[in-house]
Amino acid sequence: MGLQLNISLAQLEVSSDPEVNLKSAEGLVSRAAEEQSDLLVLPEMFMAVPGRDKRPADYAEDLNGRFVSSLCDMAYDNSIHLLAGIWEKAEPVEKAGNTLVLISTQGEIRSVYRKMHLFDSLNKKESDTMQKGSALPELCYFNDIRVSCAICYDLRFPEIFRMQSLEGAELFVLPSAWYQGNFKEEQWMTLLKARALENTVFVAGCNQVGEGFCGRSAVVDPFGNVVTDLGEGSCLKTVSIQKDRLLEVRDKLPVLEHRRNDLYDLSGK
């Protein structure tokens, strides 16, 4: 067997109470560790889905605050990497950063990504309450597999995925809070498959369920095949990402090599 990365997707209904969500995380971390997962992915906004009278800034903490520190302890105690969405303090103070933290098996923050594209569409306006990020996600190695991330609405912007693929990304992980609505579920699945197929990479989307969100967390392989689809209910699923499969597809479909760099260039440099 070649190089592989075991990744667990936690599809669940996120509470408006951070303490409830930390309690949920304890069980999910333990289960993922039992399944010998290398990386547990929790959805976007895992710290809290804002309640009716609250804004993201009401929950926001620094990266060394209680919520992230608690996740760091869980990662260390279970020797597993965690990727989770939090609300981070930002300027101006009435807004919060929609932020992903990647936590190492040593219980330390390994990488931070702040959502670049805010969902000001379809009767939603995230920019009213969120501060957008200004940097591309960082590539991280897991078992010699290069992993990048993005958040939810970023999925609609193929430039990120192409730029990161040219930098060596082989798996993209997208914690999300993808809303229900006409055609929304179909768009989610179509875009996951498109980003995987056009870049010959694995793509893993981890979505929320519950009121307003459509679920359908999924892993798609570099040929656009859906490896797993978590459906509409709460569940935890562990999938093995195989480097050999990526190399096999790229040998048959070398689209990244066939780009016309003499006519156009799109790189992160």
Image (cartoon, rainbow, N blue to C red):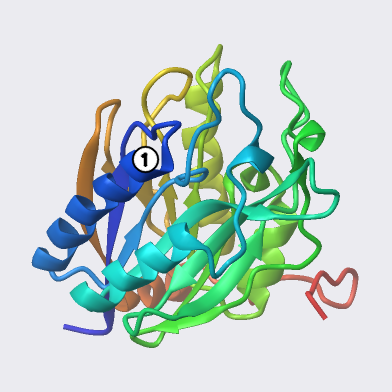
Query: Measured from the top left, where is residue 92 in percent x and y?
Result: 85, 49
Q: Is residue 12 left or right of residue 91?
A: left
Q: Amino acid at mark 1?
A: Ser
On the question of residue 176 being in view, the answer is: yes
Image quarter in which the C terminus is found = bottom right
On the question of residue 202 being in view, the answer is: no
Q: Is residue 189 above or below residue 248?
A: above
Tell me the residue at 34%/31% (across/down): 13
Examine the image and state in which quarter residue 162 appears.
Answer: bottom right
Q: Which residue is mark 1?
A: 217
Residue most toward the left? 34
Query: Measured from the top left, where is residue 238 in percent x and y?
Result: 21, 57
User: In front here: 77 or 224?
Assistant: 77
User: In front here: 215 or 242?
Assistant: 215
Examine the image and state in which quarter residue 35 appears.
Answer: bottom left
User: In front here: 130 or 269?
Assistant: 130
Q: Is residue 1 left or right of residue 110?
A: left
Tell me the residue at 39%/32% (across/down): 15
Tell me the residue at 69%/55% (across/down): 89
Query: Measured from the top left, where is residue 119 in percent x and y?
Result: 72, 34
Q: Is residue 223 left or right of residue 259?
A: left
Q: Is residue 234 above or below residue 200?
A: above
Image quarter in which the N terminus is found = bottom left
What secondary structure is marked by label 1?
Answer: loop
Q: Is residue 265 above or below residue 131?
A: below
Query: Measured from the top left, where is residue 174 in percent x and y?
Result: 50, 52
